Amino acid sequence: MKYEQLYNNYRSLAFSVAYQMIGSIHDAEDIVQEVYVQLNRVDLSSLVEPKAYLMKMVVNKCLNYLQSTRHKRKVYTGPWLPEPLIDIHTNELLNRLLKEESISYAFTVLLHNLTELERCVYILKKSLTFDYATISSILNRTEQSLRKVYSRANQKIESADKNIENKSQDTKLSSLFIEGAESGDFDPFIKELSENVVLITDGGGKVLAAIKPIHSKKNVIAFLQGIYKRGSFQGVLRMISVNGGIGVLQEINGIPNKAIMFDIQKEGITNIYFVMNPKKLSKIGHKLLL
């Protein structure tokens, strides 16, 4: 197998793994590009499992990246949310990625509530279906320890994730939200909220945002009505494709201002995510560099 063939076969998968690991589109692209450059120095004929070797390179670079940026994450202003993968234009590669490799935005947030090692092992085992022997060779850890890490991660995921994957429901709720944000009448949208709903805003210290998550239906209602009165929903609001699901994008003078996503469970909307950090909205509709 030639370098270009190996790269082309797995570049979408490599990007998906890197994105799920670090939550940044630009940095995930950089990691995949660095892996490709390094791959040219490897004797492919000596590889028994080229896919596993490629994923090992991707994962190791992701772990190194996370270690180097750990301080920045600790001093980040307010809650941190992963960048949303949004497609608002015809983008063949991104479209294919969203269909084949992506997971919902709410699940991406959930992944980032795991430790770095838990997230890594969970992705390798659950998403890539690697066996423990392969994961052991990738991470240089014993199979026994990896089984414990995966069990711990899986318990956290299963206890929190009961997401209803229903695009028609996503579309309905996004439409209700837009109607409320435009008119100020959030009542139809409010009826869809669970009692313990949590609203998280990520402004990254770049724009005005809530420093802490907003808990409970009562407080979320007050927050939405308050920012409506301050004119925070002015501009154009429209439904978008985000991480394979449906969300809302607000634009002011053609510039993305907020990306809004929902976590929908059986009891209603349990989480609302506002990504407002301009840096995290700069890649909307872009052509992936892969």
Image (tube, grey):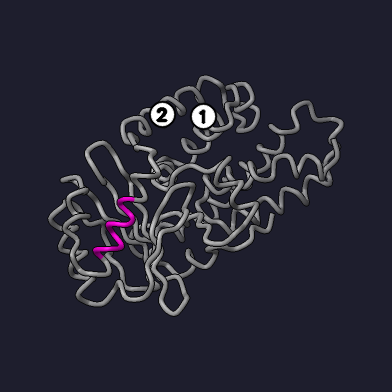
**Residue under pointer 1:** 126
- Looking at the picture, tell me which residue is in the foreground, 99 or 63: 99
- How busy is the neighbourhood of tag 1: few (under 14 within 10 Å), some, or many (20 plus)? few
* Residue 177 on the magenta span: yes
Give the secondary structure at mark 2.
Answer: helix
Horizontal and vertical percent position of residue 158 = 35, 30
What amino acid type is highlighted by mark number 1?
Lys
Q: Residue at x 55, y 47 (%)?
A: 98
Horizontal and vertical percent position of residue 101 = 57, 41
* Residue 279 on the magenta span: no
Quarter of the image where one finds residue 248: bottom left
Q: Which residues are magenta?
A: 172-180
Quarter of the image where one finds residue 169: top left
- Looking at the picture, tell me which residue is in the foreground, 149 or 9: 9
What amino acid type is highlighted by mark number 2?
Asn
Q: Residue at x 27, y 66 (%)?
A: 181
Q: Residue at x 52, y 63 (%)?
A: 284
Inter-mark Cα distance, 1 to 2: 9 Å
In the depicted structure, whether residue 138 falls above or below residue 148: below
**Residue under pointer 2:** 154
Horizontal and vertical percent position of residue 99 = 55, 43
